[in-house]
Image (cartoon, rainbow, N blue to C red):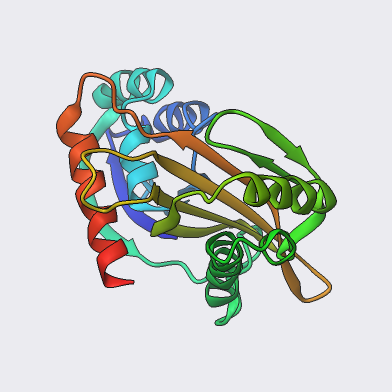
């Protein structure tokens, strides 16, 4: 999480008006976990603003929102100046997401490792094992498998019909947007020959849920990484995946 604590001095006599503008412009900001405007008891013209965000990127993106831009325009004439400003790294607290256990990220990464190991061993049962009974899998081609049993049965048929390329991934991000919920994002490729000019590649999203102390996959979705009109990005991703295949 990313935090900000700042002190703003209003034009004399305009503190209440400024506070109203600041609080009205805070709705619908993606990634904002807490936004509190408070009077400074020691200064009749000062406000403290305390913010908590998923990450710094979410905070930066909020500054481009129309509602925030409007609030900035309305509030600017009411501001005499900015005083203290502190960046923080919130650990948790009332109303904030519970920090994950130390082993949670490793456990979620291990789920993906088990799926890959099953795929690359052409073992449908092993590939399906980390999924929850009601999980969804959305494939590279848009096909949908519903439930752990269908994942196992479908993949057994796929592996019986042909040998797919080796599944290689690079984990880009692991986040915990809510207690007991994990989001993992990867760059992925299915490679028969690392020297080939091209091969299927995708951005994959894995959602896992912790229940009874155990993490299980509830969604695995692949979005083809075609990068229309940006061939340099597609080639950069292929180069990364080739490197990962060679290193693995």
The image quadrant where one finds the N terminus is bottom left
Q: Residue at x 33, y 40 (%)?
A: 199
Q: To which quarter of the image does residue 139 belong?
A: top right
For the point 44% across and 26% down, which residue is it?
Answer: 21
Q: How far across and down, in percent of the image, does residue 137 sit?
A: 67, 43
For this rendering, which residue is in front, 92 or 83? Answer: 92
Q: Residue furthest front?
A: 161
Pick whichever, 58 or 202, lies toward us.
Answer: 202
Tell how many labels: 0
Q: Which of the two residues, 14 or 88, is positioned nearer the viewer here?
A: 88
Q: Quadrant of residue 216?
A: bottom right
Residue sticking out furthest to the left: 232
Q: Position of residue 184 (x, y in %)?
A: 51, 56
Image quadrant in which the C terminus is located: bottom left
Visible residue check, residue 87: yes
Left or right of 111 in this view: 69: left
Q: Is residue 232 left or right of residue 27?
A: left
The vertical placement of 176 against 19, above or below, is: below
Q: Is residue 185 above or below residue 232?
A: below
Q: Residue at x 26, y 53 (%)?
A: 194
In the rendered image, residue 242, in percent from the top left (x then y), is placed at 25, 56
**Horizontal and vertical percent for residue 43?**
35, 52
Q: Is residue 245 above or below residue 203?
A: below
Residue 84 seen: no
């Amino acid at each position: 999480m990313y935090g900000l604590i700042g002190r703003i001095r209003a034009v004399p006599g305009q503190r209440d008006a400024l506070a109203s503008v600041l609080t009205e412009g805070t709705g619908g900001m993606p990634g904002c976990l807490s936004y509190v405007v408070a009077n400074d008891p020691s200064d009749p013209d000062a406000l403290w603003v305390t913010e908590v965000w998923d990450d710094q990127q979410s905070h930066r993106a909020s500054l481009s929102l129309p509602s925030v831009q409007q609030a900035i325009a309305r509030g600017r004439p009411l501001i005499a100046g900015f005083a203290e400003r502190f960046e923080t790294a919130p650990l948790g607290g009332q109303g904030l997401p519970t920090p994950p256990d130390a082993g949670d990220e490793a456990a979620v990464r291990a789920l993906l490792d088990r799926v890959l190991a099953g795929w690359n061993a052409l073992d449908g049962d092993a590939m399906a094992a980390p999924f929850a009974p009601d999980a969804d899998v959305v494939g590279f081609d848009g096909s949908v498998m519903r439930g752990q049993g269908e994942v196992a049965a479908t993949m057994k048929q796929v592996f019986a019909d042909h040998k797919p390329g080796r599944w290689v991934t690079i984990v880009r991000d692991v986040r915990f947007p809510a207690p007991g919920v994990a989001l993992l994002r990867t760059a992925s490729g299915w490679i028969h020959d690392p020297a080939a000019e091209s091969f299927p590649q995708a951005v994959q999203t894995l959602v896992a849920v912790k229940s009874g102390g155990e993490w299980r996959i509830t969604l695995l979705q692949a979005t083809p990484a075609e990068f229309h009109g940006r061939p340099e990005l597609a080639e950069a991703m292929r180069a990364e995946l080739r490197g990962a295949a060679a290193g693995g």
